[in-house]
Image (cartoon, rainbow, N blue to C red):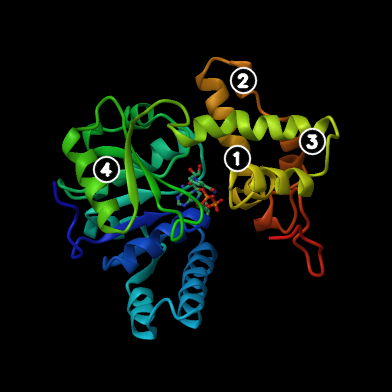
């Protein structure tokens, strides 16, 4: 099976951490990419973030200036969803909420052409359930990137009950063409990585609650022992506690309240306080000016 050719326009919906990263990946692979968000400032911020990452690669000698400019030129800001009429692949990366995602996909279905593919970057929601809102759920699949999308190689290609093999295979081949390492998964709560990661984050927060050590010490221990580039607290701060907490709740609910997946009260408090991690300047760590961060 071949991946999508680079003349296929990609629409990314949601210009936050993940949407802008995914737009970067698709544009770097040669596709024209519409980057859409309901908030114009999110589109501007997302595109500025892509530009910053591209410039960084140029200064590091990892990317030619001309390629950086060409990639950025392929990222087209959009605040009107009508651009979907032009797209062959729509990738949704909006808030982790089933009703809101279903509403968006219904709207997309009314705009996209017959052959277009619909994909969701959801971390945990059922592709089958999102698809229930659609007239043609067979062309919807999960295309789950990891944060930061330009750097992380793994992409889970998630099939719901209705997803055709051809759609999953096309997305698999496309992700491979984009330089990623795709894996197929069927739609179970949290898929592969987020399912296994839930008890990991939960246990780390229990150890913290029991005051075994502070987040920096726990992160250092897990980085060192497991060879992870980040410990659990740094990683949750990077993901965003609003997103991580929503994913945990979704997996917990989907498993009928199985306590292995119970959300953490510590994380609930962080979300309530608006301490969402890096994106808000504070989470388990303080990212404000002059803040002391754990060693890299
Ligand atoms: P984010 O909060 O950084 O960005 C979400 C963006 O979606 C915001 O700019 C918001 O304005 C926009 N948005 C919300 N509702 C919208 C709508 N109806 N139409 C258009 N735009 C809308 O969130 P993030 O972290 O990028 O997550 C997005 C999705 O990706 C979620 O489903 C999340 O579970 C998933 N994900 C997140 C990862 C992470 O590490 N943060 C990793 C992999 C997947």
Q: In this view, does 69 lie above or below 282?
A: below
Residue occupied by mark 1: 244
In the image, residue 77 lies at what x, y percent? 40, 68
Question: Are discs 2 and 3 less than 8 Å apart at CB?
Answer: no
- Which badge, 1 or 3, is on the more N-terminal residue? 3
| Image point (38%, 75%), residue name | 72
Asked whether residue 265 appears in the rendered view, the answer is no
Residue occupied by mark 2: 260
Q: How many tags in the picture?
A: 4
Mark 1 Cβ inside 8 Å of ligand 1: yes
Callout 2: SS: helix
* Label 1 – label 3 distance at C-alpha: 17 Å
Residue occupied by mark 3: 208
| Image point (36%, 70%), residue name | 75
Task: Give the quarter of the figure containing the C terminus.
Answer: bottom right
Q: Nearer the viewer, mark 2 or mark 4?
A: 2
Callout 4: SS: helix
Residue occupied by mark 4: 109
Side of 164 relative to 188 (left or right): left
Q: Nearer the viewer, mark 2 or mark 1?
A: 2
- Which badge, 4 or 1, is on the more N-terminal residue? 4
- Which badge, 2 or 1, is on the more N-terminal residue? 1
- Which badge, 2 or 3, is on the more N-terminal residue? 3
Q: What is the number of the mark on residue 106? A: none
């Amino acid at each position: 099976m071949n991946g999508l050719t680079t003349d296929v326009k990609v629409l990314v919906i949601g210009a936050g951490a993940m949407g802008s990263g995914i737009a970067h990946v698709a544009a770097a692979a040669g596709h024209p990419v519409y980057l859409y968000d309901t908030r114009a400032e999110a589109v501007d911020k997302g595109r500025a973030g892509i530009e910053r990452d591209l410039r960084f690669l140029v200064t590091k000698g990892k990317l030619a200036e001309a390629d950086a400019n060409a990639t950025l030129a392929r990222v087209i800001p959009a605040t009107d969803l009508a651009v979907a009429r032009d797209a062959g692949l729509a990738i949704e990366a909006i808030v982790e909420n089933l009703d809101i995602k279903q509403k968006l996909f219904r709207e997309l279905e009314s705009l996209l052409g017959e052959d277009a593919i619909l994909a969701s970057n959801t971390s945990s929601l059922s592709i089958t359930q999102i698809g229930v809102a659609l007239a043609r759920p067979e062309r919807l699949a999960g295309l789950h990137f990891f944060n930061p999308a330009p750097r992380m190689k793994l992409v889970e290609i998630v099939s719901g009950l209705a997803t055709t093999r051809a759609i999953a295979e096309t997305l698999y081949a496309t992700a491979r063409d984009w330089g990623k390492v795709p894996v197929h998964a069927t739609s179970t709560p949290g898929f592969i990585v987020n399912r296994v990661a839930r008890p990991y984050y939960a246990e780390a927060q229990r150890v913290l609650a029991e005051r075994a050590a502070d987040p920096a010490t726990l992160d250092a221990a897990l980085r060192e022992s497991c060879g992870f580039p980040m410990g659990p607290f740094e990683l949750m701060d990077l993901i965003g506690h609003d997103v991580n907490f929503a994913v945990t709740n979704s997996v917990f609910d989907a498993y009928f309240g199985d306590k292995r997946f119970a959300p953490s009260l510590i994380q609930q408090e962080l979300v309530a306080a608006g301490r969402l991690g890096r994106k808000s300047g504070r989470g388990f760590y303080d990212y404000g000016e002059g803040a002391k961060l754990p060693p890299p």
